[in-house]
């Protein structure tokens, strides 16, 4: 089910560079980012889905966001903060 959610939730296609970077992320990162951004799940809901603690979700999500932002910068996306604004930590508490 988790793989279906991540696979069924396409990255934002308005910017093909962002979509390409998203597609190149590790499966674990894409899965977490999709559960947050497109499925709108909270840390607790993700923890239940993945079978881990809410703290583990927070740590993994923080790391996934950092990797995504770093990959966007490496790909030359000028405003990675705008591209990942939907994934802000403050929206998930």
Image (cartoon, rainbow, N blue to C red):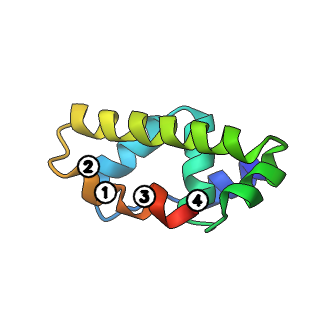
Q: Residue at x 69, y 38 (%)?
A: 56
Check disc 2 and report its element: helix, strand or loop. helix
- C-alpha distance separating marks 3 and 1: 10 Å
In the rendered image, residue 90, in percent from the top left (x then y), is placed at 46, 61
Disc 3 target residue: 88
Disc 1 target residue: 83
Disc 2 target residue: 80
In the rendered image, residue 23, in percent from the top left (x then y), is placed at 46, 42
Asked whether the residues under the numbered discs 3 and 2 touch, taking CB atoms below 8 Å apart as contact, a structural biologist would say no
Check disc 4 and report its element: helix, strand or loop. helix
Q: Judge depth for marks 3 and 1 and give the one in front.
A: 3
30 displayed left or right of 7: left
Asked whether the residues under the numbered discs 1 and 2 touch, taking CB atoms below 8 Å apart as contact, a structural biologist would say yes
Q: Residues within 10 Å of mark 3 (few under 14, many from 20)?
A: some
- C-alpha distance separating marks 1 and 2: 5 Å
Q: Is residue 15 above or below residue 65?
A: below
74 displayed left or right of 51: left
Q: Judge depth for marks 3 and 4 and give the one in front.
A: 3
Disc 4 target residue: 36
- C-alpha distance separating marks 3 and 2: 12 Å
3 displayed left or right of 11: right
Mark carried by residue 62:
none
Which badge, 1 or 4, comes first in the chain's sequence? 4
Which badge, 3 or 1, comes first in the chain's sequence? 1
- C-alpha distance separating marks 1 and 4: 14 Å
78 displayed left or right of 39: left
Asked whether the residues under the numbered discs 3 and 1 touch, taking CB atoms below 8 Å apart as contact, a structural biologist would say no
């Amino acid at each position: 089910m988790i793989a279906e959610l991540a696979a069924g939730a396409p990255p934002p296609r308005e910017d093909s560079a962002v979509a390409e970077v998203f597609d190149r992320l590790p499966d674990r990162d894409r899965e977490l980012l999709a559960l947050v951004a497109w499925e709108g799940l909270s840390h607790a809901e993700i923890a239940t889905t993945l079978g881990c603690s809410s703290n583990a979700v927070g740590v993994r999500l923080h790391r996934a966001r950092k990797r995504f932002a770093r990959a966007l910068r490496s790909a030359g996306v000028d405003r990675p903060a705008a591209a990942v604004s939907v994934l802000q930590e403050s929206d998930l508490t």
